[in-house]
Amino acid sequence: MLYLVTRTHAPSPMDGKPPKDESWPASNTEGYTTRTGYTPTTPVSTSSSDSLPKKTKINGQQQLLQDMSRAPLKDKLAYQFPYDVETKFPAYIWQTWKYTPASGDFGENLRPAEASWSEKHPGFIHEVITDQVAVHLLRHLYVSVPEVLEAYQALPLPVLKADFFRYLILLARGGIYSDIDTYALKSAAEWLPESVPREAIGLVIGIEADPDREDWADWYSRRIQFCQWTIQSKPGHPVLRDVVANITQETLKRKKAGTLKGFNSKNVIEFTGPALWTDTIFRFMNDEKYFDMSTGKGNITWEDFTGMTTAKKVGDVVVLPITSFSPGVQQMGAEDYDHPMAFVKHDFEGTWKPESERHIGAEVQQEGQ
């Protein structure tokens, strides 16, 4: 079953196609619950735009009519990585680590997890990207957006670069990103119900935390926190565009001010991690550039997702329940690994964190007993 928490899409300045009237096919709506005041529709694409500069042939060469170097960063990213919701999800699996599986230093404890992604996704291109390869890959993909490369190079900690890389690679190429300590329990082909038209979905995310307790802020950054250890997207999605632009601009701002240092686990989470990711997603869901806000009865908030046990759709985003990417944590309503909605197992190694801050899920559970 899929629950709908949706608005009418409004054409944005970056959209190249008018909104459709198709909504969800009548044959698929039986059993769904639509939040009062929100009209489900198929999201529009952003594959082209009249507001973006076009190319023209001059002296046999392609040149821009407008100098993109002066355009706002989000417009540059939209131009370089156009979004078309009607395309297929790319068959890529992206992971990052210090070594590739071909190296003897890869770590035997990580091999079963890494192999599970290839086993569950035959025919996918599965890449484990090292730090050195990431630099060269990003230089190739973002050569036309040099401020992004400057920001990536300026980030002072490997974890910040690892967070940034997942957004960058999904924006440019799409597919699945998943941390190296995750196991694929089911193929991504099973993550969405068969009744969901794949040409209407551009981003699939899961809930990391739903701490229904008074002291939730002592343990988590947000009341509902979306996980970013596993993300599936189509290239160019506006959420990815926004998170890349935000990290780039804030990094360069801090670099100029000389304050790009002094990070700890808490402000890493806020700067590039799940707190920023969660805020960006909620901002998209309530953005009048993408949705007709007049059709709703207020903003979409954490209250629309707390306690959910089945997938929910907001525009072209599907949010999976906590069991899907966090099974077996034995708290916050998460079911075990053998549950039908359990798709990805996360070992919570948190290798960038001090030992005292790893496995926070177990600590929260013990504290609550």
Image (cartoon, rainbow, N blue to C red):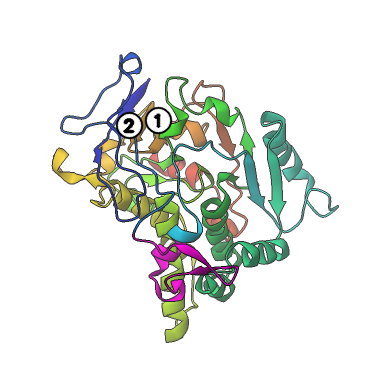
Q: Residues within 10 Å of mark 2 (few under 14, many from 20)?
A: some
The residue indicated by pointer 2 is 307
Q: Secondary structure at mark 1?
A: loop
User: Which segment is the magenta one?
Assistant: 51-77
Residue 296 seen in this snapshot = no
- Check the image and report above or below for 251 versus 270: below
Query: From what the image shows, is residue 134 above or below residue 229?
Result: below
CB atoms of marks 1 and 2 within 8 Å = yes
Q: Quadrant of the N terminus?
A: top left
The label shown at residue 167 is: none
Residue 90 picture quarter: top right
- Residue 333, numbered label: 1
Quadrant of residue 49 within the rendered picture: bottom left
Q: Quadrant of the C terminus?
A: top left
Percent x, y of residue 258: 46, 85
Residue 53 included in the magenta stretch of the image: yes
Circle 1: residue type: Gly
